[in-house]
Amino acid sequence: MKFKKQSWLIFIASLMTLLFTVAPKVAFATETASSDKTYTIATDTTFAPFEFQDENGDFVGIDVDILAAIAEDQDFKYELKSLGFDAAVQAVESGQADGMIAGMSITDERKQTFDFTTPYYESGTSFAVLDSSDIQSLEDLKGKSVAVKTGTQGATLAAELADQYGFTVNTFDDSPNMYQDVVAGNSVAAVEDTPVMGYAISQGLELRMIGEKMSPAPYGFAVLKGQNPELVEMFNAGLENIKANGKYDEILAKYGAEEGQSSTAATTTSDKKYTIATDTTFAPFEFQNADGEFVGIDVDILAAIAEDQGFEYELKSLGFDAAVQAVESGQADGMIAGMSITDERKQTFDFTTPYYESGTSFAVLENSDVQSLEDLEGKSVAVKTGTQGAELAAELADQYGFTVNTFDDSPNMYQDVVAGNSAAAVEDTPVMGYAISQGLELRMIGEKMSPAPYGFAVLKGQNPELIEMFNAGLENIKANGTYDEILATYGADEGQSSAAAESSSSETTNEAAAVEKDSFFEQITNNFSALMKGLGTTVYLAIISLIIATIAGIFLGLMRTSGNAVLSGIATVYIDIMRGLPLLVMSFFIYFGIPQMFNIQISSIVAGILTLSLNAAAYMGEIVRGGIQAIDLGQTEAARSLGLTKAQTMRRVILPQAVKVMVPSFINQFVITLKDTSILSVIGIVELTQTGRIIIARTYQSGSMWLIIGLMYIIIITILTKLSDYIERRYVKNKSTI
């Protein structure tokens, strides 16, 4: 019994020794591990003044600075990831981020998923007047005008208070015009989200806020429910400390936001009509149907979101590369074109939450012996320039020993494989699957590669309200089922939505077999209206351009033959420049370069006419010069001997004879200009050649369609040639009669 008692005493003593020696070490190790951990914190991208990118490319803002100050105070490390609001939420939910700070309102619904810190900021709406104004309160606004921005919380608040305080409301499309209406004295006050207003004032806007902040809503730092409780504790402790030591007030003052006045984030839904660029031939995301309407997953998603969020837009089908340049040059406000979100593109663009998860696949002819990428050694692979597929092919070319052929659009890329010039094509999986389902006689090989999300894009730092509206609208159409309906319309299930229509070989083969191809004449009848519209655009561009070029060419020709060294030199330099500059480069410069340099917008039709006119004018000038110099010098001498002035000699003697020489060359230049219109498809003009590309993108019947397009060009050019002969004969007959 005594032995048992001693044994228990020894056991208890040993256990206590273990607790007092090992437990502190474990606790210390845990504490050390926690302190050494680098937390991943997600945030928004464009939410000034809370988080935004400054001119140096650094992310700054109230949220960013508060987090940095708290981390320094609490001595923890973190990595800040700017993802966009919805993506930040998803990152925390999926464990990709430990927490988020992004002007996130604390709501009962969000509390079911997240644990929040003590609110670090209260948002709201404020009125502001000129610094020198006598107005001190809303009561002083009676009988006066108040400026608001359409669609904002401030506009709603002003409408609610207008009768109560007796003021009228002036509506503007954007904040700068709203502010300037107050500065100009047309309105006495402006209503705006408090932090946005405060930030504008801190940047030099000579206004001051009056009255109290309205419609308060707290912002908090969030972690996934039950996860990272130490982050919440450190944030709360640090927030209390930086408020006590004045750091918090310094941060708010830096961005023009006072404690207790604070803020709602500006979601700028306005009456502005946005220009959205897209691709031309990227079915099922964007393509032209048999009725000539642009449809597709991207097109329908954008339309649904615009309807949900109440904004207007104009869709411009430019082609992928041209769409990118349009956004970069300011010709478009945003783009949706099956654009993969990559780190490289994030340096230039701000993206929304991904609206579609895609991948990339290789495809070969149905009867090809190629079964895997290893079989491509020594062969060629077709890609579409600027795409994820092009990047993937470039990365794998050396590994698998194939060469790469590059094309501007998917139909030409596919046809290169069908023609046997390339052994395979690389394309986004849903696009490839849709093409096969529409009758393209290819089959996919290997596994889907490089999963990449598609996103709506705007130029970095521009149109942040578009990003916010797209994200909000996307969430809504997913919730109400519209998103699933759109995917189903184009054969992409929600379950596949990310990988999109990655059909098996047997399924796609059966689907392809079920698609009956149109005959040659059915191609004409089914697409007659689209073809006629394309032809009309081609002829219109050629005629207008040639009229302008003829007038300019006459002046250039006369300048060249004037005998004046300065005038002749100017004309010579112009002609040399225009003849040496490729038409494609000129069209890009006029449509993308000039707007970017001078901050203006030029429509694609105007840019196209300018391109053709400036180019043709140089050749017209040479035609005029050649016609004048073809007239015998004796004609000039005889006219001068009869007492005619130099101008009279040119007008009455030389030019009438020179026109006869010029007519065939004029008609020939018209033919050249007519054919040159096909180049303008690169800036989004749907002329005859581009119409053919669009139809092929839908039907994948390139042979018959290019034959139809070719015949249409031949017919119209033959008519012009016969017209030239007729005019020349009539001119000669009239001259001989005289």
Image (tube, rainbow, N blue to C red):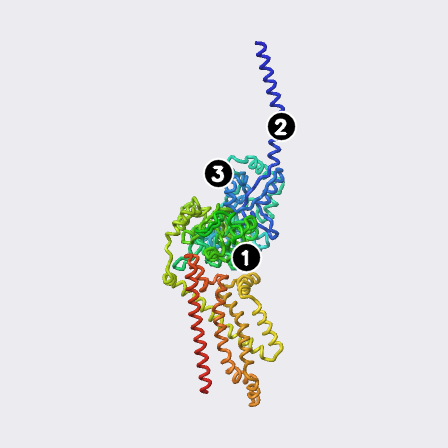
| Numbered disc in front, either 3 or 2 | 2
| Numbered disc in front, either 1 or 3 | 1
Q: What residue sits 52% from the left and 84% below the top? A: 652
- The circle drawn on residue 25 is 2
Classify mark 2: helix, strand or loop.
helix
Residue 591 percent across, percent down from the top left: 53, 63
Q: Name the one closer to the observer, 39 or 283.
A: 283
Of the numbered discs 1 and 3, the one sitting upstream in the chain is 3
Looking at the rendered structure, the kind of residue marked 3 is Thr
Residue 728 percent across, percent down from the top left: 46, 79
Measure the alpha-carbon separation of dots 2 and 1.
57 Å
Looking at the rendered structure, the kind of residue marked 1 is Glu
Q: Decide if residue 710 is in sight here.
A: yes
Classify mark 1: helix, strand or loop.
helix
Residue 388 percent across, percent down from the top left: 52, 51
Q: Decide if residue 346 is in sight here.
A: no
Measure the alpha-carbon separation of dots 1 and 3.
38 Å
- Which residue is at the far bottom? 642
Category of crowding for the residue at label 3, using alpha-carbon neighbours closer than 10 angstroms: few (below 14), some (14–19), many (at least 20): some
Looking at the rendered structure, the kind of residue marked 2 is Lys
Q: Name the one closer to the observer, 60 or 384.
A: 384
Q: Which quarter of the image is occupied by the N terminus?
A: top right
- The circle drawn on residue 328 is 1
Q: Name the one closer to the observer, 728 or 507.
A: 507
Of the numbered discs 2 and 1, the one sitting upstream in the chain is 2
Of the numbered discs 3 and 2, the one sitting upstream in the chain is 2
Query: Residue at label 3?
Result: 113
Q: What residue sits 46% from the left and 40% below the top? A: 109
Query: Is residue 67 shown above or below 668?
Result: above
